[in-house]
Image (cartoon, coloured by chain):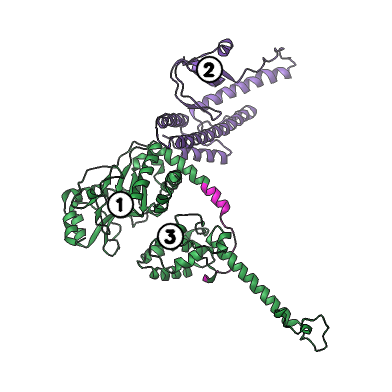
Chain colours: A green, B purple
Amino acid sequence: MEDSALLTYYSRDDVATALVDFARNREVTGRFADGGYGRRPGTLMYPGDVVEMVKQGMKSFHCSVELWDNPMTLDQPKVSRKGWDFLIDLDCDTLDHGREAADILLEALKAHGVTSIFTKFSGRSGFHIFLPWQAFHDSLRSSFPEVPRAIGAYLEDFVADEMSKEVKDGVKIDSIAIAPRHLIRMPYSLNEKAGLVSIPVKDPWFDLETARPEQVKVVPFELRARPGEAMELAEIATSFLAKKQATRRTEAPRMEVKGRIEPQFFPPCIQLILKGMKDGKKRSEFILRNFLSSAGWDWASIEQLLLEWNLKNPEPLRPAYIESHIKWSRAQRENLPPPNCDRKEYYPELGICQPDDLCRTVSNPITYALKKHRRYMFARKEEERRQSSRSKKPSPAPESSADDEGSTGKTPNQG
Amino acid sequence: MVSFEELREVHRKERASPKLVALAPTFWKEVADYFLGKMQKYEELRQQTSRFTDKVLGQFEREVRNAGRVISELYTLREKKLLLMAWSEVATKDRKDLRDLTPEERDMYKVILEQLKEGRNTMLAGVLAGEKAEEKEEPPAPEPETQQVRILENVASFLGTDLNLYGPYEPGQLAELPLRYVKLLVDKGKAEIVSAFEGKS
């Protein structure tokens, strides 16, 4: 999309005002053509700011789902969170799959007694489904991202049987989007890749033409809900996740590592990640970080490896992203294992699940590495034992007994 | 209004503490509001005609039972501590600090305390003085636990102490209910007892 068309679109009063209205209490920044974000923390105060940012080269506008008393103080130690909106970020391979998935999810939400649902087109092939903060109780203010993640996981499981295989394969609920300070495309922002506008929609089967910048009609809206209307959903989802995690904890690998496991013992999925990732870099970083720490690597080595790996990615992550996650992990009491192999949002969806024979015997990539390493160590010890017993054995004398291997005229290996 | 998370937190603290955990004076009223809200939501969800309705109702019922279980356990824990506290006050004559109790619990405490004191004053004192208690009649046979009633007014859904969901009931409907709810509904004029003869016909 040409810069002049972009400027024409964002210069519209109704568009700039809609962006500013939605920005209230949210962290906001713009995105440049190279995919990089503008300065953070930032916000939008006046419609004039929108045009100014576009003139600086920003193509699209992104905001937090977290609501802050003052987003500009987010780089300070104690910041007061006002609340958070629940967001389902539907990442879809085609718009039709997105429409079908959004339709099913909206029906599922309504069946839970939630009616104040705000849906917007992502500007490409997906949808963003919001439940406003008022739909929850104030008691959940500090439960971000745990409770919204639980709702996301619960809903994904809840609707799984209703989705056709194609939709299930082509759509995923992006759980990474439910993370502290994660940004999502704002309503009425352009999607710079598709040249379409991320418009609010009443129905997922909306007319795509209405998302063309020149066709967009801004409809004023406000995220409002009946107080607490999604609390039942939150409670059911929290119980669901607690039960699931309890099951997972019992299944999680509990094997001690002595020293560190070297890359030659890594499973195929980790080897593939290490070659560099085009999509799913954040999930890959998460897998690698947990995998390496469970494989006995120290944090300095992990950081070095991740920063080197990042350079192999066609569009690298910001180094600060990796450094901050390492810092966080380092502060935790115990190392978490990487997600289990059956977590479809990780290995299968990233296209890195190419199992070999050993994979079929394990449920977590770290177990693979441990098993392979242990087999290697065992084989090596056996070899050493064999060699040392051979070297201790006296050389066969010419007059050795008939049952000596040497008497058959064969070397031991030939026997 | 109190949330399930908060209820669970109170329950966790009560279980971990040997003493009664301080509750807000309005705590039990808030719990009643919580369950009233739940039941209203339940009625609302039952009206839905989505392909997901049955599944959601199943999840919802499980969740309400969970909440009911947490509250029943919390009540039982407090009840036990309250009884021990009353016994300790009677045995040691130390006045107890009742500030951590809700008003309803304070009332119950006073009744228990009076009963225990009266027992000491009459039964124990009498026995020590060589007085024999009057002969009492044999206790009556245990009453049945449920009773059939005819509903006279609309009764909304409610969670029983057995963690079963009852209702909703409409006028004219016959329902087999635990005795404690029979009494409650009959006293409020919302139901009448169906005689054994009538019930069979």
Labels 3 and 2 positioned on one and the same chain: no
As measured in the structure, the alpha-carbon distance from the residue carrying label 3 to the one carrying label 2 is 62 Å
Q: Tell me which numbered mark, 1 or 3, is placed earlier along the sequence.
A: 1
Q: CA distance from mark 1 to mark 3?
A: 21 Å
Q: Find out whether the residues at labels 1 and 2 contact each other: C-beta distance under 8 Å.
A: no
- Location of the N terminus of chain A by quadrant is bottom left
Tell me if mark 2 has few (under 14), some (14-19) or many (20+) residues whose alpha carbon lies within 10 angstroms of its own.
some
- Of the residues shown, which amino acid type is indicated by label 2? Lys
Q: Which residue is mark 2?
A: B183
Decide: is B194 above or below B117: above
Q: Position of residue A24 (x, y in %)?
A: 26, 48
Residue under pointer 1: A122
Q: Amino acid at mark 1?
A: Ser
Percent across and percent down for residue A99 are: 33, 47
How many residues crowd mark 3 within 10 Å: few (<14), some (14–19), many (20+)?
some
User: In the image, which is nearer the foreground, mark 1 or mark 2?
Assistant: 1
Q: Quadrant of residue A6?
A: bottom left
B20 and B5: which one is in front? B5
User: Horizontal placement of B44 versus A369: left or right?
Assistant: left
What label sits on residue A379 in the rendered view?
Answer: none
Q: Position of residue A71 (x, y in %)?
A: 30, 52
User: Where does label 3 land, which residue?
Assistant: A350
Quarter containing the C terminus of chain A: bottom right
- Badge 2 sits on which subunit? B
Secondary-structure class at tag 2: helix
Instruction: State which mark lies toward you, 3 or 2.
Output: 3
* One can see residue B3 in this view: yes
- Farthest residue, direction bottom: A398
Q: Which residues are magenta?
A: A244-263
Chain letter for mark 3 = A
Write the residue at 49% across / 30% down.
B102
